[in-house]
Amino acid sequence: MTVEQERESAGLMRLAQAGDQTAYASLLVLLTSATRQFARARLGGVPWIDDVVQETLLAVHRARQTYDPGRPFAPWFYAVASSRLIDVIRRERRVVSHEIAGDTLPEPIGEQETGHDDIDVEAIHAAVAALPERQREVIAALKFQDQSVREVAGRLSMSESAVKVTAHRGYQALKRMLRGQRRED
Amino acid sequence: MRTDELIVELARAAGPVQPLPRPSIRLLRWTAAMVPLTALAAIVIGLRADVSTVLTQPAYLGIAVATLGTALLSAASALILSVPGAERSALHRVVPLLSGGLWVLVLVVLLATGGDAVRRLLLFPFHWACLAEIAVLSVVPGWVLFAMVRRAAPLRRAWSGALATLAAVGMSAAATQFICPLDDPAHQLVGHVLPVAVLSVLGALVGHRYLNWLRG
């Protein structure tokens, strides 16, 4: 953050604290760019830079009352950004360690395994249709249209890690739904 | 959600906020409210009979000052740590611990100069009444300080929790010194310092869990 940006950010934050939403939006735009640079300098070109940016913006929003208008803005902002960066790195490591399990769509449950012949591909399609919109889009793209995580992320304007997390949650929801259906039957 | 959508949402949700007062002001407020409250609670529990006599003894006063100093320095550090970017060096975390170390050092010196130190310590002169007083007297100061810390944005939650707890139990240990009639440094180490240390470690765990300001 340059001296000029620092001064501008401090001024915008003062206005934002007073309730000026336009100034606040300008500040967040400025911080988006600063956070992206900050994260790229430390992480290189990882595909989840946007996660760091969004987490930082949310943290800035929640902590904005702690900025003291009489003090420099940059130390306050970078303390928040560093903290979010570290948390996102930790979360990404956890996601990667669960990725293999999360990558597998539950197979149609066969007669041999379950003793039921009435849960089939159609049941899975119905369960997918009942998922929340974003999970449905992600799973349909990954599993029915054979798109890669990168393609889905690009098409839905999500980060790759967000696609993986959404897919993982969708798979868990599908498992619960299909188990529930078996019990009902 | 895309970043530009997030910005629009956050800007739409942002009303005016009152900037938090500086940590020094917040410390003054906490101290001004909690020192008299803790003193009053100690009086209600019952001061030791010879309190006016012991107040003239330098060793007794030295211990009281070291204990209260540890409490106030810890409160200051907890409040500073709760503001992003305010903590410029590790000194803010180390100074309260050094002050606590001074408290222990004074007691150890008094214990050693009193003779038969090891035997007196091994007798483990611990009394549940002192632990109960320290715990009870620290509830309100601790609760208030945790609330003040959480209202900010503590980035080091475990440290903030430990220091807030050390502040509260340190203050209650200083008050307990005016209630407890036992001046033996061995008792003070085992019955006052040890509970303060254990409770502060527990405070770190509580802080790590409950000072997550991002959860809202």
Image (cartoon, coloured by chain):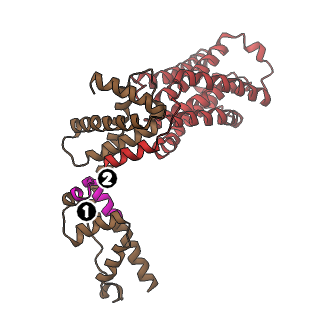
Who's brown, chain-wise?
Answer: A
**Which percent across, then down, holds residue B135?**
66, 36
Same chain letter for marks 1 and 2 = yes
A120 left or right of B143 in image: left
- Which of these two is toward me, B2 or A74? B2
Of the numbered discs 1 and 2, the one sitting upstream in the chain is 2
Question: Which residue is located at x 45 percent, y 82 percent?
Answer: A183
**Which percent across, then down, holds residue B148?**
56, 33
- Which of these two is toward me, A57 or B100? A57
Residue type for callout 1: Ile
The Cα–Cα distance between marks 1 and 2, rounded to whole angstroms, is 12 Å
For label 2, the crowd category at 10 Å Cα-Cα, with few meaning under 14, some 14 to 19 and many 20 or more, is few
- Which of these two is toward me, B53 or B174? B174
Residue type for callout 2: Arg
Element assignment for label 1: helix
- Which of these two is toward me, B113 or B157? B157
Dominant secondary-structure state across the stretch colored magenta: helix
Colour of chain B as rendered: red
Which residue has dot 1 on it? Answer: A100
Quadrant into which the C terminus of chain A falls: bottom left
Residue B116, labelled with which disc? none
Question: Which residue is located at x 37 percent, y 69 percent?
Answer: A131
Question: Which residue is located at x 74 percent, y 27 percent?
Answer: B42
Inspect this view and state whether residue B157 appears: yes
Which residue has dot 2 on it? Answer: A94
Figure check: B57 above or below A173: above
Element assignment for label 2: helix
**Which percent across, then down, holds residue A122?**
31, 82
For label 1, the crowd category at 10 Å Cα-Cα, with few meaning under 14, some 14 to 19 and many 20 or more, is few
